[in-house]
């Protein structure tokens, strides 16, 4: 099937009320609208950065539906629908597509180790249940434990017409190269590793899904627009600044750093949900100082 996805797609943070007790849907919609106004091309709600695996199925359903309504087609909504089991993944995937999401992003099931036969059956069942709706694979072995190998990804894309792309957060540029080289024509490869956004775009990736893009979307837009326009010097300069910023955000370790960074830049995304933890006062102070010194505040 024809499906085009490109550009800068923040892995959208989920605002919670105090102590992570409830999802603040109003604030979540405001964040989606804010990001759209800053020029991003889509949002990826309920993913790793969005604490989706700490949310109930009903919370995830409502959040996706509310975000779809809030952005009103201005940008794409790729709803993360992956769960630890196949039945719940199918339930969320079908709901997201019925609610108007442009596609569903499905992470590999985690905790247990699965072989390629199991993963092939899992993703095949989800793709079939989606009834032609666009599905993107989501490869993040650092969190999900199970690796989606280039061979498995390419076979899934060839078997299922509606598996239209992937988000790759493996941090393995060699594997990404294999996928870009051998995936079917029109397969949308989206990079999920901030440290080589520039390099991935040059290699043929269509865009990026990023946690850091919630806070500094302008850096990603400079990289994406620079590469697309052939201004590689400008794009590389932004990549260097982004790579430095990743260390300040303790990239991939604490959701609270992204929420604090966004708060410091004018938008309060509320609390994290336990067992995620909030930052202490000293951590917040050091972080704010580092952002100022890096020219990000």
Image (spheres, rainbow, N blue to C red):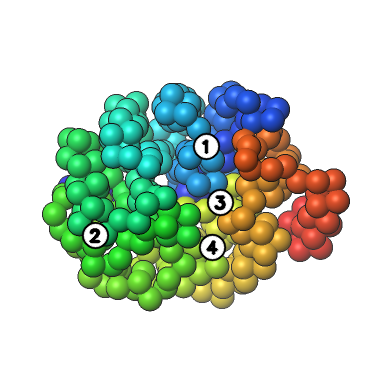
Q: CA distance from mark 3 to mark 1?
A: 16 Å
Q: CA distance from mark 2 to mark 3?
A: 28 Å
Q: CA distance from mark 2 to mark 4?
A: 27 Å
- Residue with the most extreme left position: 159
Looking at the image, tell me whether mark 2 or mark 4 is earlier in sequence order: 2
Q: CA distance from mark 3 to mark 4?
A: 9 Å
Tell me the SS state at disc 3.
Answer: loop
Of 87 and 190, the residue lying toward us: 87
Labelled disc at residue 194: 4
List x then y, in percent, for residue 40: 51, 47
Labelled disc at residue 211: 3
Kindly tell me whether residue 230 is visible in this rendering: no
Mark in the foreground, 4 or 1: 1
List x then y, in percent, for residue 71: 47, 31
Of 164 and 7, the residue lying toward us: 164
Looking at the image, tell me whether mark 4 or mark 1 is earlier in sequence order: 1
Q: CA distance from mark 4 to mark 1?
A: 23 Å
Q: Which residue is mark 2?
A: 116
- Residue with the most extreme front position: 112
Labelled disc at residue 165: none
Residue drawn at x 42%, y 28% as measured from the top left: 57
């Amino acid at each position: 099937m024809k499906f085009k996805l490109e550009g800068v797609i923040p892995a959208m943070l989920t605002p919670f009320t105090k102590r992570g007790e409830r999802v603040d849907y109003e604030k979540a919609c405001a964040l989606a609208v804010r990001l759209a106004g800053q020029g991003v091309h889509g949002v990826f709600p309920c993913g790793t950065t969005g604490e989706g695996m700490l949310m109930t199925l009903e919370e995830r359903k409502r959040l996706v539906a509310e975000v779809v309504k809030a952005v009103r087609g201005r940008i794409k909504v790729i709803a993360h629908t992956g769960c630890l089991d196949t039945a719940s993944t199918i339930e969320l995937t079908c709901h997201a597509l019925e609610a108007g999401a442009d596609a569903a992003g499905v992470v590999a099931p985690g905790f247990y180790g699965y072989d390629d036969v199991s993963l092939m059956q899992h993703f095949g069942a989800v793709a079939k249940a989606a009834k032609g709706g666009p599905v993107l694979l989501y490869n993040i072995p650092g969190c999900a434990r199970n690796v989606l190998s280039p061979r498995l990804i390419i076979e899934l894309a060839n078997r299922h017409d509606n598996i239209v792309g992937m988000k790759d957060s493996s941090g393995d540029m060699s594997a990404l190269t294999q996928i870009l080289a051998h995936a079917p024509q029109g397969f949308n490869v989206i990079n999920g590793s901030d440290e080589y956004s520039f390099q991935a775009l040059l290699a043929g990736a269509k865009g990026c899904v990023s946690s850091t893009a919630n806070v500094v979307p302008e850096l990603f837009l400079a990289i994406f627009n620079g590469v697309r326009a052939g201004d590689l010097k400008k794009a590389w300069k932004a990549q260097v600044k982004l790579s430095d910023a990743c260390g300040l955000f303790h990239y991939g370790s604490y959701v609270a750093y992204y929420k604090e960074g966004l708060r410091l830049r004018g938008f309060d995304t509320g609390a994290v949900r336990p067992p995620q933890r909030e930052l202490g006062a000293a951590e917040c102070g050091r972080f704010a100082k580092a952002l100022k010194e890096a020219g990000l505040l």
